[in-house]
């Protein structure tokens, strides 16, 4: 094992923020203080932009108590970015690293960020510069290959489940068709988490549509009609990333949106998909007066103040700390994955997986977690999910027993 | 004071649910147990529909512990309705009241429900039938005339403020224009509550548009541009009820929606207004690639599990209890209003106000709570609001100090 180089550690945050991404940031900032080899921990503002712009915050100059407070705040405290570094950017980043004697780079983000980390790691290797690059996972989409689950997902799932639970009670009291559009471009994990809102027979969501399955308008409308005929109402959870059998994104046909520099189409921040589906339901019911509504839960899924899963928060801190310990004491580059220990109890370990195995790849919901009709999840998925969303989610909501009056 | 009649009490819930409407229901159900004159407390399912359909739940047969659990659940436990009783409906309701010896009627709802309560109260008076009718206020819109504030508002305001706070941090980390459409058809109280998200200079929302002022697209776009040029980003809170100088609802031009039996246009459950405003901003900036997004907070504002204001919950319970006590011991019909006691500390009393003074009227934001430019609220409003949203809202979110590195 090569000796750990002496130098600066840089940490950055990238991609869509989460409720616990700052836990990982603070994990890195505090852990780097332990090792004499690490001569400073600098936070790059707005991801790699902050590196080639040399816009750094001195994280060792922050007080421990302020960092512990920052850890609890949702959203990326350093600022985030969706900028994909070009080869020129990478060269510029590299010049900065060499000039500043940066030897440790911790990049907190999803699969796009893993790609960026991988590119920078490769440039360093080619230049025979001892740079220790660790990708610190975060994504509400939960779509990183080789990771059992990702920090950020549990809290977003908790928000979705709590939101859906209240929304379903609302729909039960004023019945109709309610369509909720949830985040998840390519993977349905977050949309699937809405199933946790069910506590009793008849509770919604009654239908769940994920990007892992082809989405047919005709099938959708028939499904909604069948539920409505049975229950007098229907709650639907649908992923923003649903697409037709040919893989064409449904939302893409509707939205005049943006494309980021990773080539990702903007799906969030618009209500077009939900509104369109409401129109389709009214048409299929042959009833323009049907009470049908859509909400797009939008950015609240990742940013809402007060739906943190404590399990998720603790794990997010842990991956940040372990990324630093591994970089100094182990020395390999990679992505710090949470993996589950076999057995009935929820126990996890951390494991470094290769950057290239995570970069730009998408882990999707396994087949066995989606029902045959492609409009619901299975108990296996719920068993997987429950430990991640934190305490109190299974507390039963109070309901009247509706005892008839004696006449 | 006439002696209290012996008979049945009926309670119903109407209009859009809130996070604490069941507190009032449970307040009525428990308080009615105290008085020997009240021989039973029946919950009408889905508002007045449950009365003329004789669909009742025996609330005295429910255990106290289950009722206390129901009180904590958002949304209307009895089921709600937006049905406006016709003269024929009122006649049918009346036959049921007489047949069943109903002597107390508690109707939990907003100004539409106060109208219904008023109509039924008038029918009883014409027929010289001793029926004690009390309107128990609930509305997230906070728009009842003669009420300082309404149960349901504080919790919805808390949700909005917490949501906006996280959303603003999100926007600060990935800068752009973010437009959040909030509930409030005719009154801006709920949209205005977003101002509570501001903790430091530069925090959003930077612009707040309320239905109390005419909304001009040109002025809006210029406002957004000015903020964006100054801060590099802009957070907007806009009420779903904004309208042009001639009073024409902005959303009405965009939405092919429903109209309920009170003549209210459907504004919620669609993302059309936000999406339209995003388009206008991009046009005004001359930049179709501008990062501009819209979220419509939608039904979560009234139904989210876990944003209850404890102050709001306690007051909702209290108005339910006091409605019963007043009906038995006082005997006048009316709407049970929360009024504020003068003085620096937050102290409230309950006061019965006439049903006709509340029915179908809308209280709007007073002029002095809106800034001159019509795009923000004043400190006076924030002073009014703060005690209503419950504890912990002023806790500062942790932020980095961004101490520059020594070069």
Image (cartoon, coloured by chain):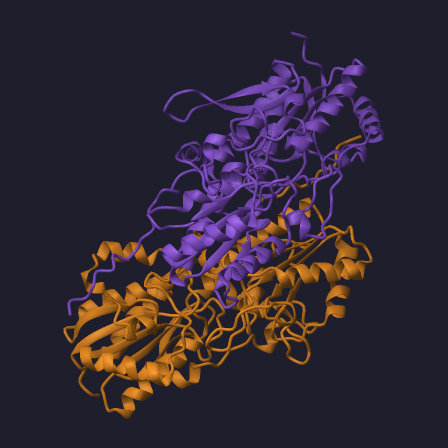
Chain colours: A orange, B purple
Q: How many numbered marks, from 0 up? A: 0
The residue that appears at 71% across and 26% down in the rendered structure is B117
Q: Position of residue A351 (x, y in %)?
A: 36, 78
Q: Is residue B103 above or below residue B221?
A: above
Q: Quadrant of the N terminus of chain B?
A: top right
Q: Is residue A74 visible?
A: no
- Front-most of A347 and B386? B386
Residue A311 placement (x, y as % from top left): 40, 61
Q: Quadrant of the C terminus of chain B?
A: bottom left
Q: Looking at the rendering, which quadrant does residue A370 occupy?
A: bottom right
What residue do we see at 34% from left, 50% from top? B397
Name which quarter of the figure residue B332 lies in: top right
Q: Position of residue A403 (x, y in %)?
A: 71, 38
Q: Residue extending furthest top?
A: B1
**Left or right side of B293 for B6:** right
Residue A92 appears in which quarter of the rendering? bottom left
Residue B374: tell me if it is visible.
yes
Above or below — where is A387 with respect to B63? below
Relative to B162, say whether B27 is above or below. Answer: above
Residue B336 percent coordinates (x, y)? 59, 23
Q: Which residue: 60% across, 77% down?
A: A367
Between B132 and A127, which is closer to the camera in this rendering? Answer: A127
Residue in the foreground of this view, choosing between A80 and B151: A80
In this image, A89 relative to A204: left or right?
left
């Amino acid at each position: 094992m090569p000796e750990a180089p002496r130098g600066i550690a840089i940490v950055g945050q990238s991609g869509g923020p989460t409720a616990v991404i700052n836990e990982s940031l603070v994990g890195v900032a505090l852990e780097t203080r332990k090792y004499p080899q690490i001569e400073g921990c600098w936070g790059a503002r707005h991801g790699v932009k902050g590196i080639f712009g040399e816009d750094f915050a001195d994280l060792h100059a922050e007080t421990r108590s302020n960092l512990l407070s920052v850890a609890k705040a949702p959203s990326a405290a350093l600022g985030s970015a969706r900028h994909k570094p070009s080869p020129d950017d990478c060269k510029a980043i590299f010049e900065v690293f060499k000039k500043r004697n940066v030897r440790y780079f911790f990049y907190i983000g999803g699969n796009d960020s893993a790609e960026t980390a991988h590119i920078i790691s490769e440039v360093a290797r080619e230049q025979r510069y001892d740079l220790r690059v660790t990708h610190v996972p975060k994504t509400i989409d939960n779509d990183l290959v080789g990771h059992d689950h990702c920090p950020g997902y549990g809290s977003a799932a908790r928000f979705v489940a709590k939101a859906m639970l209240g929304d379903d009670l609302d729909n039960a009291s004023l019945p109709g068709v309610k369509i909720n559009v949830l985040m998840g471009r390519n993977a349905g994990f977050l949309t699937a988490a809405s199933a946790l809102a069910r506590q009793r027979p008849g509770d919604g969501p009654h239908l769940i549509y994920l990007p892992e399955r082809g989405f047919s308008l005709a099938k959708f409308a028939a499904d909604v009609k069948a539920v409505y005929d049975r229950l007098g109402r229907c709650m639907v959870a649908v992923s923003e990333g649903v697409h037709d059998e040919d893989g064409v994104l449904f939302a893409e046909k509707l939205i005049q949106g943006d494309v980021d520099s990773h080539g990702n189409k903007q799906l969030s921040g618009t209500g077009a998909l939900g509104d369109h589906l409401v129109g389709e339901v009214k048409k299929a019911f042959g009833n323009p007066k049907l009470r049908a509504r859509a909400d797009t839960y939008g950015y609240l899924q990742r940013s809402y103040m007060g739906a943190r899963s404590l399990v998720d928060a603790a794990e997010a801190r842990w991956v940040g700390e372990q990324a630093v310990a591994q970089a100094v004491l182990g020395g390999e580059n990679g992505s710090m994955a949470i993996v589950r220990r076999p057995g009935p109890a929820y126990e996890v370990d951390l494991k470094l997986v290769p950057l290239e195995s995570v970069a730009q790849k998408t882990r999707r919901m396994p087949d066995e977690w989606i029902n045959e009709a492609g409009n619901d999840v299975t108990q296996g998925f719920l068993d997987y999910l429950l430990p991640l969303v934190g305490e109190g989610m299974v507390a039963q909501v109070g309901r009247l027993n509706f005892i008839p009056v004696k006449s």
